[in-house]
Amino acid sequence: SAVISQKPSRDICQRGTSLTIQCQVDSQVTMMFWYRQQPGQSLTLIATANQGSEATYESGFVIDKFPISRPNLTFSTLTVSNMSPEDSSIYLCSVPGRLLTDTQYFGPGTRLTVL
Amino acid sequence: AQSVTQPDIHITVSEGASLELRCNYSYGATPYLFWYVQSPGQGLQLLLKYFSGDTLVQGIKGFEAEFKRSQSSFNLRKPSVHWSDAAEYFCAVGGNEKLTFGTGTRLTIIP
């Protein structure tokens, strides 16, 4: 399984500002995923980030609000733009296992609180 | 479309008692099924997975799950829970490129 780290682990931000979350993997992967976990809720996929192409966003998520970068095969960033209290969530990145029958492996998450 | 239902939002059990967490899925083909645990302030840890073969799968930390195709279920069990098992448990269906999660079951352990 991959080892995944995220920065920052938590942050408290003011309304209207933006925060960039970093995700680093210890091996090269083609795909990386970004999830949001709102308080008391399950995980919802925001987007899939492929190296060398634009991210693919799920319904309800747009690039202007959640721009994603994928500069190489071990790194990605997710920016939460123009934040509001509704953006307070845990944001997690994940990478797929090597086999189709495998699962995804998750980073520790970034806990974001917007005041 | 694939989906997962975890009907129990919150379960409380006594330490040492047995545990069963329910999971029902909807999937068009043979499902790949997973259970994850999320401890307070921690990321998601994979407990076990099923993709074929023996319908009773063993996982880490003494957990097991049984796949029942006729009931579209993949319930998680543990014979004797420990205080450290208190956490949020998520069932998921899919594979390495698309996972759909249930809403989770919060497990509380009482002495």
Image (tube, helix red, strand yellow):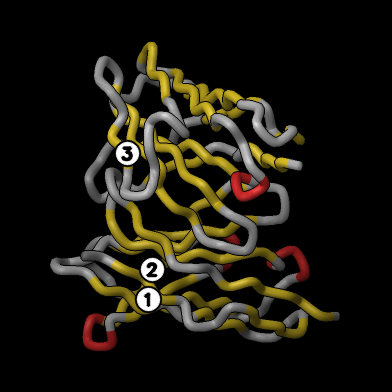
- Which subunit holds the residue at mark 3? A
Report the side of B15 relative to A80 (left or right). right
Disc 3 to disc 2, C-alpha distance: 34 Å
What residue sits 33% from the left and 24% below the top? Answer: A29
Residue farthest toward the front in the current orientation of the protein: A16
Q: Amino acid at mark 1?
A: Phe
Q: From the image, tell me which residue sits under label 2.
A: B57
What residue sits 31% from the left and 68% below the top? Answer: B3
Discs 3/2, front: 3
**Labels 3, 1: one chain:** no
A15 relative to B73, above or below? above
Residue farthest toward the left in the current orientation of the protein: B29
Q: Position of residue B102 (x, y in %)?
A: 44, 67
- The picture quadrant where one finds residue B28 is bottom left
Report the side of A74 relative to B107 (left or right). left
Discs 3/1, front: 3
Mark 1: give few (<14), some (14-19) or many (20+) Cα within 10 Å.
many
Q: Work out which quarter of the rendered image holds the C terminus of chain B and state it.
A: bottom right
Q: Amino acid at mark 2?
A: Val
A19 relative to B54, above or below? above
Disc 3 to disc 1, C-alpha distance: 29 Å
**Labels 3, 2: one chain:** no
Residue farthest toward the right in the current orientation of the protein: B111
Q: Which mark is residue B2?
A: none
Disc 1 to disc 2, C-alpha distance: 10 Å
What residue sits 58% from the left and 31% below the top? Answer: A82
Given residues A27 and A9, the one toward you in this image is: A9
Q: From the image, tell me which residue sits under label 1.
A: B74
Q: From the image, tell me which residue sits under label 3.
A: A57
B26 relative to A100, above or below? below
